[in-house]
Image (tube, helix red, strand yellow):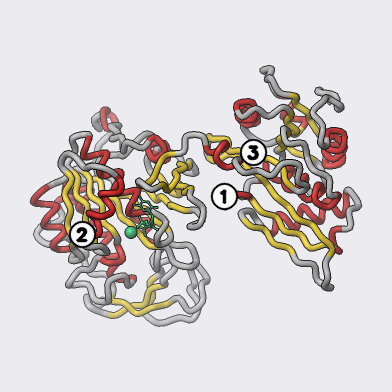
Amino acid sequence: MAKSKATAFFCKECGYESSKWMGQCPACKAWNSFVEAPAAGKGALPGKGGAVARESAEPCTLDQVPAERETRISTGFGELDNVLGGGLVPASLLLVGGDPGIGKSTLLLQVCRNLAADGRSVLYISGEESLRQIRLRANRIGTITGNLRFLCETNLDTVAHVLEKYRPEVVVIDSIQTMYREDASGAPGSVGQVRESTNVLLQLAKGLGITIFIVGHVTKEGTVAGPRMLEHMVDTVLYFEGERSASYRILRGVKNRFGSTNEIGVFEMAEEGLREVKNPSEFLLSGRPEGASGSVVACAMEGTRPILLEIQALVCRTNFGMPRRTAAGTDYNRVNLLMAVLEKRLGLRLSECDAYVNIAGGMRISEPSLDLGIVTALVSSYQDRPVDDSLLVFGEVGLSGEVRAVSMAEQRVAEAVKLGFETCVLPQSNRAAMKKDYPVRLIGVRNVQEAMAVLEGNAGRKGGAADGKV
Ligand code: TYD
Ligand code: MG
């Protein structure tokens, strides 16, 4: 029915395909996102004859599948292995996204170096940098030993032939936006090209059993440039993020066919490349002001990992009719909601105030357990009364001002103990369910009124005013 080279239109955001141009994408509702591109061809690899498809055409029962599939390759970075769910899975396709200059190339070069030092054959293909530039970077990260080779190439058909010839175990493609295929039309980086290229790489990874890392640039909207469909095609999606001005970087698993998502790895950009940060809480709390109002430590979970962070709030009288509110690092609407709760339940006149909430260190977290921390920081700044430095809060706040239980309270408390906190204000239902004793004062609260009473009793002092059991 359709001609093989018919033009079609794609949504840049989600990859939705249509025969005519549309102002709004019916799938993702993005405006003005349609671009013209050739309809997808067969996408098969030249000369491969669809061997992969034929191989998997025989149905089987699960016990016919060899059980020892679960081999994992360590990347030499514990933080990265963690995010991947225990290491690299052979023959998988991974996408590493992130802003330009955040350190994607550095991270992958270091991973390649580690893998090569472990005796694996690794190939790093760059379409962005010359061999000289790579060499300069490599000099910074230390000596490279073992079988690590480099190739500067943007033609994907050439890349495919090289991979078939050398069959390395791990390959890095830096970046997918620079790759092109001759028989797909459009400039490199266009929707059609990126889709075609990823398709070819997917077949190479599965067909030849190669683990392939794809580097993808992120657009302003925060998706990997143009096609979000890239995320559907790969096995694992990792995002490398952080403030370019701050030295630490967070590697976040967004999709993982071989493990849980939402695990994070923390790295620090140093002179000699990236360094792992084994204890992010300590790192994030360094430089915390002492005795300043509006600053409080809260505990968020990233996957199974508790992370302590500082929430800062600045509340001051507004000079305009419309108060200004901003939230950096957390959900703006959530902050507004919490301010309305405070106004209604504690009678604070926040509607006359500007309010700025910030998660210090450039972390981005929107987890309900931060609610109590945000509330505490807001009240502390409103009343200009500092919160005790050795105190930690967590808990979800509901619309009637109730403090609700959160998951994994014990891990959060354990992290607080590890970092030497003395008091923990937490939801009463979590407090009641605690089985173990911790060397920290646990104060359970039922609602924001109780929480604020505890904080008033505790402000600026280290002794025990409030009853440890409430
Ligand atoms: P890069 O890996 O090129 O980023 P991406 O591939 O995501 O675009 O990272 C470049 C930045 O990292 C650059 O601003 C310099 C910095 N950097 C260091 O601080 N130390 C180092 O050892 C290296 C190699 C880079
Ligand atoms: Mg790069």
Q: From what the image shows, is residue 426 above or below residue 33? A: above
- The answer to whether residue 77 is visible is yes
CA gap, disc 3 and disc 2: 45 Å
Disc 2 packing (10 Å; few <14; some 14–19; many ≥20): few
Q: From what the image shows, is residue 408 above or below residue 220? A: above
Residue 121: x percent and y percent? Answer: 17, 42
User: Sequence order check: which comes first, mark 3 or mark 1?
Assistant: 3
For badge 2, the amino acid type reads Arg
Residue 408: x percent and y percent? Answer: 62, 32
Q: Secondary structure at mark 3?
A: strand
Disc 2 target residue: 132
Disc 3 target residue: 299
Residue 372: x percent and y percent? Answer: 74, 43
Q: Residue at x 27, y 76 (%)?
A: 186
Q: Nearer the viewer, residue 76 or 88?
A: 76
| Image position of 339 (left or right of 150) | right
> Looking at the figure, which quarter contains the N terminus?
bottom left
Q: From what the image shows, is residue 112 above or below residue 197? A: above
Q: Secondary structure at mark 2?
A: helix
For badge 3, the amino acid type reads Cys
Within the image, what quadrant is residue 14 found in? bottom left
| Image position of 387 (left or right of 138) | right
User: Sequence order check: which comes first, mark 2 or mark 1?
Assistant: 2
For badge 1, the amino acid type reads Met
Residue 9: x percent and y percent? Answer: 36, 77
User: Sequence order check: which comes first, mark 3 or mark 2?
Assistant: 2
Do callouts 2 and 1 mark residues in contact (Cβ within 8 Å)?
no
Q: Residue at x 21, y 64 (%)?
A: 43
Do callouts 3 and 1 mark residues in contact (Cβ within 8 Å)?
no
Disc 1 target residue: 363
